[in-house]
Image (cartoon, rainbow, N blue to C red):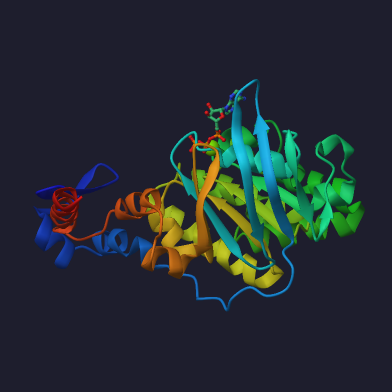
């Protein structure tokens, strides 16, 4: 939408130019690094085979009288990333709450490796709880500000796997190394001594400490700047390959979906509107809502908005 772009770095102007030349030929390395942000793309995975690790089956749930989920069904396979997208209030986080047992469905169930999970987390075994971990948008509020990283990461390793003494110490260091934070430098820090991206890495380490099969990521990159987001996505992708993790990746950001998803579940008003492989969905969306959602992915193309508006107005004339 912009005519001109000014790039700032730590309070100083890096460069300024009209949009077209700035996008086509940025002068500064910093600007180039900003444009490169969605350069990350997960390697295309073969179609998923075998049985899913998580099956959400016909789940209806409410917070009171009104149903906020209406017959939601989809599967998640080991080693795969299922992106869940849809407008605010469409029920994405509520679906995550049902999977983790924080909210009990009125109807339907969640299967883990083919077996029904008890509806409430209170009735789930420690092993069932260990297998589905969750990372939140606000790394800030998710971490107890009084605890050092040693305890923040150590506690889930102790609780879920019963690690103690030297085994625990070495596991904490391994987990820090896995999220690319030098153990000796970070192990005694408080959350307030970390950047936003580093805090989110601690959220990832805490989830990994449980050695889960599924990690639910609810808007985990939304509060971070573009370059930091890219780093987190790359890290998640590497860890997925290393541990064959399944991700349920809830996001508003379709550029992120494009770069990391294998499959996409589109939600609206508490129901699944459409689901399928990312390639299928982006190439050939069947539902109007999906088309509308996908057409709103902004592109680094100065003519993108004009072309989109022209296409929509042609559609309107025809329709
Ligand atoms: N604790 C709650 N009590 C009552 N209603 C709730 C509660 N949490 C969510 N809702 C309602 O349930 C519906 C689904 O909310 P949910 O948080 O699942 O949406 P979402 O898709 O995650 O949205 P967002 O993208 O904004 O995070 C909304 O209408 C919301 O207002
Ligand atoms: Mg939400």
Q: Residue at x 55, y 42 (%)?
A: 271
Left or right of 253 in this view: 165: right
Left or right of 129 in this view: 217: left
Q: Residue at x 17, y 56 (%)?
A: 311
Q: Position of residue 232 (x, y in %)?
A: 51, 57
Which quadrant of the frame does ligand 2 lie within? top right
Residue 255 sits in quarter = bottom left
The number of callouts visible is: 0
- Up the image or down, 222 lies above or below 174; here it is above
Q: Position of residue 216 (x, y in %)?
A: 64, 50
Q: Position of residue 121 (x, y in %)?
A: 81, 38
Asked if residue 220 shows in the view, the reply is no
**Nearer the observer, 69 or 103:** 69
Q: Residue at x 80, y 46 (%)?
A: 156
Residue 281 sits in quarter = bottom left
Residue 136 sits in quarter = top right
Q: Position of residue 240 (x, y in %)?
A: 63, 66
Left or right of 79 in this view: 162: right
């Amino acid at each position: 939408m912009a005519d001109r772009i000014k790039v700032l770095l730590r309070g100083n102007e890096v460069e300024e130019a009209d949009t077209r030349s700035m996008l086509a030929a940025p002068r500064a390395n910093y600007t180039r690094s900003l444009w490169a942000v969605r350069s990350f793309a997960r390697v295309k995975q073969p179609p998923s085979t075998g049985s899913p690790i998580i099956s959400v089956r016909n789940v209806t749930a409410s917070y009171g009288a009104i149903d906020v989920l209406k017959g939601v069904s989809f599967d998640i396979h080991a080693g795969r990333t299922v992106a869940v997208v849809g407008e605010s209030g469409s029920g994405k986080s509520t679906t995550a709450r049902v999977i983790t047992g924080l909210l009990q469905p009125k109807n339907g169930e969640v299967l883990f490796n083919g077996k029904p999970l008890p509806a409430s987390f209170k009735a789930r075994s420690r092993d069932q709880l260990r297998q589905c971990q969750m990372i939140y948008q606000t790394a800030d509020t998710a971490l107890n500000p009084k605890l050092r990283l040693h305890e923040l990461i150590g506690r889930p390793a102790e609780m879920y796997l019963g690690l103690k003494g030297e085994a625990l110490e070495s596991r904490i260091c391994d987990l820090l190394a896995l999220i690319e934070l030098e153990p000796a430098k970070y192990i005694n820090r408080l959350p307030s001594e970390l950047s936003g991206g580093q805090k989110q890495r601690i959220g990832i380490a805490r989830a990994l400490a449980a050695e889960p099969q599924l990690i639910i990521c609810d808007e985990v990159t939304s509060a971070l700047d573009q370059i930091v987001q890219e780093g987190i996505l790359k890290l998640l992708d590497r860890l997925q390959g290393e541990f064959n993790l399944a991700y349920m990746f809830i996001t508003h950001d379709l550029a992120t979906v494009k770069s990391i998803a294998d499959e996409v579940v589109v939600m609206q008003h508490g129901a699944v509107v459409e689901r399928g492989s990312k390639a299928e969905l982006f190439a050939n969306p069947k539902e109007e809502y999906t088309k509308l959602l996908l057409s709103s992915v902004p592109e680094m193309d100065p003519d993108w908005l004009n072309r989109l508006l022209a296409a929509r107005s042609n559609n309107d004339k025809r329709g």
